[in-house]
Every structure is written in structure tokens, then in C-alpha cells.
Amino acid sequence: MFRSSESRAARRLSPLRQALTPVALAVAWMSMHASAQTLSSSATANSSTLPVVTVTGQTAKDTPTELSNSYTAAGTTVGSKLPATLKETPQSISVITRQRIEDQNLSTLDEIMAQTPGVAVDLSGTAVIPSYYSRGYPVDYFQYDGVPIQTGGASWGQPDMIMFDHVEMLRGAAGLFNGAGQPGGVINLVRKRPFGKQQFSGSLGFGSWNTRRGEVDYSTPLNQSGSVRARLAAAYDKRDSHVDYANSERTSLYGIVEADLTSSTTMSLGAGYQKRDWRPAMMGMPRYKDGGDLGLPRSTFLSTPWTHWDFETTQVFADVTHSFNSDWQLKISAVSDHETSDLKYAYVTGAVDRSTLAGPRLAGGANAYDNRQLALDAMLTGAFQAFGRRHELVVGANWYDRQANSEGGRLNGFGGTPVNVFSFDPRTVADPGAPTWTSNSRTDTKQHGIYGAARLKIADPLTLILGGRFSWWDTSTTNLLTSRVTSDYRQNGRFTPYAGLVYDLNPTWALYASYADIFRVQSNYKDESGAGLPPVIGANYEAGIKGAFYGGKLNTSFAVFRIDESNRAVQVSPTVVDSCCYATNGKVQSQGFEAEVSGQVLPGWQIAAGYTYNTSKYKQDPTYEGQAFRSFSPKHLLRLWTSYRLPGDWNAWDVGAGVNVQSAIYNAGGTPKVRVSQAGYAVASLRVGYRINQHWSAALNIGNVFDKTYYTRLGSSGFGPANFGNVYGEPRSAQLTLRAKF
């Protein structure tokens, strides 16, 4: 096996975790605070802006959002790698800024995505790990500062936001820079960078279910000129849950050093570390056999006290940026990501008979994962003159290698015991001891590609963006117990096109249209000749209008979109033998429209709101044609949050409010087929903040203000949605946070 139980135990007792206790974090806070007291600040007691800081080596469109106090961003590169404002980008992009992260206490990526326009959050097969869906399709790639890595490793541990300035979400196909994947979109996490002057911030938070969270963040120059800079950040988060027995303890560390090697060359080197010990409510809850709700309390825990899922993630990154002149720049980036996790669990499975209350039984198992990823990206960006106009160009290449090891085990003598879910006591379930490991496999995925895009100024009001990519992709799975390669799929030289038009109606408004696609390898399916099927193609068509007001302080957009996913494998033989026989006759279509507004409406009034209407269905499929493709992705989705700082003598106070609204969803499956439904619902939240002085502030956040009872996830249709996997949303909660900024 790739990893012994002794090494797993040793990792859980690692000295790094032992060292960073709440006491150590408090000591670090006091030490940094004492140092920070010597810093000067140009902010006045009645000003809502941050102290003046120097940011070295960044353009205006790269300015960190933490300096803006805004709910919108000056620019983004997630769509084209060419710095551009949101209005200049012919695709739908949302940005969750640092100010909004702090205002809503969004400490992890899943909390960010739950507030992002157009994104539906669904818990995966375990009913505890979130997956993200955009326009009906899963998001299976992240980017870190524009460098793509695959989810399934980094996504499981949910990155802590202490490491990031903001998060960008591009909706629609993103194959130009990512290569293979789903057409739903891509998430780009933009890291914090050091400042040219000393800066310190920290927070302490206490809330419902024994929530305790502390953060420290310190940036400083390392020499007199500020040409070498560093930033260190840490967070400690420990909380119970509204579900009995469930709890989580998370430690996060982040560090980066940035150096101006010359006046035109900057290098950065950094690392992030995250450790999480977690007792989740595995697999959620069952329902009645007819799909009806059991009406159990939201605190119901149908697992065991010895259930655990522990994570450890280490990410090391580096980049070098060299400016040849004011127009041309070369950037080379690398990301190494290593995640391990151990899981031993019990859960209750089986639908409940209304008459006898029988059906559910105990089940359980164990898993261990070891995922390693290495990604490289090199790109040359610049501008040139032609035909009397200025144009922009990016050319580059990236390479990605992921090795995912997976062990599976059984719990000896465990499982099959009948359970009465209405009177279940988790403490009565004995720990079956160490698992017997029965499977061990490794999946290797490699992808590399070359890409290019040009932003061509056709006329004063008209910009044409053209791009393309050639990709090579290979994945194989090996049974490590037998050393047998069980699968091997590849794609060579696949071309991915991109095109967009932006027409400026005036300085405020612009019309746009774009086409983007992406491919997904399915050569594991064989046609009647025995050959692997060609890739699935996801094509995104989009058109809309964008507006930028007050010099970009307020951004608006309206878009209509359609995604056609074609070449999907459908079975054409009565039975399947050795992955044969299939044909590329399947087609799925997702379409709709969305509207978004973000930024400053009036001085002191920030808003972030997005509405999405989306339908998806099987257009061609021998079994499901005409049916909904993603029934658990809501047709209507509204995300709204707004904050207002009171005027005059009340200027120290700010108030915030928000609501998340979604329409009804359902899941159907199992034998016999059962439909489980969730009606539409709205969840409101509130915030009251008080600025004590120019350095200190306090805020009270209340979630689910009206204590709405709803399901955030419906059961897995593959095993019958009434059997397990149904998860309640969080009840009303409160958190008080004290923040310091120097």
C-alpha cells in the first residue's frame, strides 16, 4: 500500500499542528500587535479608507481588492490573461472581494461559492464535501493566480480565505487556458501579496455552536528600500455544529516573500499549509420510501463519534515576472500541491417504511488519499501597433501533472445492523477498530498545451478577441495490488478556439458576444470497431451588455447564454463488455440569462447582487431525452448582499443585509424510482458593524435570520435519493467579530 496506518497516525500528531494551538496564536497576535503599534497611519478617525500603502510591481488593474473597501474589482485576468476591466471582458465574471469576505465572514471557499452569482453548491456523494455547479455543469478546475490545477484534491479540504485577496468566478467554458474539463466555468483564487510598507491586521470571532476563529496577517519590507518584502498570515478555526457530535478544527498558515531582483524583474516564493481534523455527519439522512420527509430534528447525527475525516494540504508556489519594456512582460509560474486525507466512517442507509419504520441499516468503511499535483505556466504578454491602433497579445504554454493515490478499506464485522432513525444513539455503536485495506490504486493525469490570444482594436469602439489552444492529455489508472494498468485514455493535439467582440456604445456601456469551448476526454468508451470515442465538446455561446459607472466603482452586466455539450457517449449495444459499445449521439443543452451588479451605488453604499435563470435538458439521449439534465440545480437563483455606512454623526456604524433565494429542485432515481423534492426557499442574513476608532472595529453577523428549515442537499439518485444523502441547511446563527488594522 502507498501509505501505512503508522504514517497516518504520525501525521495526525505532527509537531506543526501541536505547535499552533490557540495560545500560540494569541501570543503571535500580541507580538505582532505590539510591533504594529509603532506604525504610522494617515487615516483619520472618521475615514472609511485604509491607510496609504505602497504596492510594488503591480499595475492598476492588479491592485489588491483589500485596498479598495469595495465589492467590485478594478480588473481581472481570469478570462484572457490580459489585464482588463470587467466591462472589457466578453464573458460573465464575478469577483468576491476582500471587503465582502470580511463583511460576511466568508472563511472558506465553500462559503464564498454559496454567495457567488450563478453558482449552485451541492454536497458530493458523501453528503459533506461541496461541489460547485455553474450553468448546470460541475466546476472541475481551480486556478491559483491563473495557474490551473484539478479539483478533487485541493477542493476537498476547502482552502481557507486567510491566504487570498479575492476569488474570481468565470462562468462558461474556459478551455483556452485550462485545456480539458467541463463547460461550467473556472474558479481563480488570487493570493495575497506583500505590501511595500508595514501592515498588520487580525481578528477574533466567537459564535454559535462554540465557533472560535482567530486570524493574524502581517506584511513588512525586509530591507530599507522595500525591494524585498514578506507577508505572513495564520488562522485557527475550531467549531462544533448544529448537528450533534459533528465538529471541525482547522489550522492554516501562509507565507510569501517577494523581491525586486532588478528594476524590471520580480520574483515571488511562498507556501500555504492547512490541517483540518473533522468529524462530519457522513451521508446525511434517509427519507421515507415514497420520498417523504422524516421530519427529524436538524441536529440529528446518523453517524458515530469515532467517524473522522482528517486533511493535510501543503502548497508551494513561485513566479518570476520580467518586464522587457513598458509593453512586454514575461511571467513564469509554478504550483506544487500535496494533499493527504484519512477517512473512517459509519452512516445509516436505507429508506424508511412508513408502517414499520424499518429499512435503515448501519454501513461504513475507510479510505485514504494522497494527491500530488505540479503545474507550470509560462506566458508572454504585450502590446503592439498595427494599422494605426494599439493591440494586445498573449502567448504561452502550461503543463500539469497529477498523481492521485486511493486506498479503500472495510470495517471488519461492521455493518448491516438495523437502525431506528427516530431513536438512534450514536454512542451505542462500538468502534470496529483498524480497517482492513482491500483496494489500492493510482491515477496519473498529465496535460500540456500551448495557447495564444489577441485583443485587436478593429475600430475606436470595436475590439475583437481571438484565441486558440492545442492540448495533449493523458490519464491512466493502475491497480497497485496487482500492478495492472486498468485504464489508459489520451487526447493528442486537440484544438480549442475562442472568439469575442466588445462594442463600446459610450464610455459607460458596452455590448459583447463570445464563443468559447472546452473538451472532455471519453476514450474509455469504445465504439463498435473497438476504437475510443472522440471527446465531448462543450460550447458556450454568450451575448450581453456591461456597464461601468463612476470610473469602474460600480459594474453591471446582463447576459444570455447557451451551452451545447455534444458528442456525449450513449450505449448502443444491449450489454456492455470491455467498455463496448457506445456512440457519440448524446447531447445536452443548458441555457438562460443572468444579471449582476457589484460595487458602490452611492458613497458608503456597496452592493453585490446576481440573478440567474437557467434550464438544462437532455436534447438527444435514448433514455433521458427531454428530461432535466441537472434537476438539483435550481432554475432561479438570486444572490444579494448590501452594506451601508451611515452618514454624519452615525458614520461609525454600518449595516448590512442579504438574501439567498432559489427555486424548487428535485432528485429522482433508485429501484423502484423515487422522486425527492425541495421547494424553493429564501435565507436572509444581517450584519451590524461599529468602527471603534481608526484601527479597531466590531461586527455582529446573523445568518438565517428567520430560522428557515430547508434541505441544502437532496439524496444521491444513483443509490436512490430516499436511502441517504439528504442534508439540512444551517439554522439561525450569530457571530461576533473584533478586527484590527494597522
Image: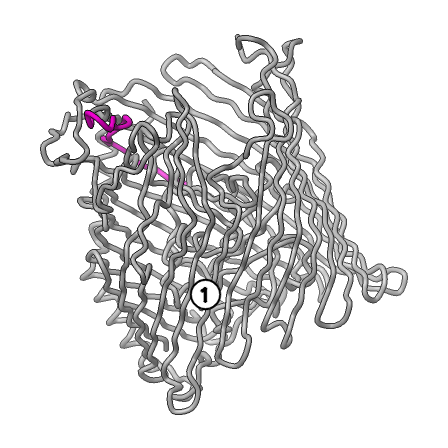
Quadrant location, the C terminus: bottom left
Q: How many marks?
A: 1
From the viewer's perspective, is residue 225 above or below residue 445?
Answer: below
Find out whether residue 541 is within the magenta segment: no
Find out whether residue 349 is within the magenta segment: yes
Question: Residue pushed farthest left?
Answer: 428
The residue at 52%/35% (across/down) is: 401
Which stretch appears magenta? 338-357
Q: Which residue is mark 1?
A: 641
Q: Secondary structure at mark 1?
A: strand
**Would you identify the image quadrant in which residue 518 lies?**
top right
Choose between 306 and 304: the one closer to the eye. 304
**Would you identify the image quadrant in which residue 24 lies?**
bottom left
Instruction: Label the magenta part by its dominant secondary structure.
Output: strand
> Residue 516: x, y in percent?
69, 44
The residue at 15%/26% (across/down) is: 433
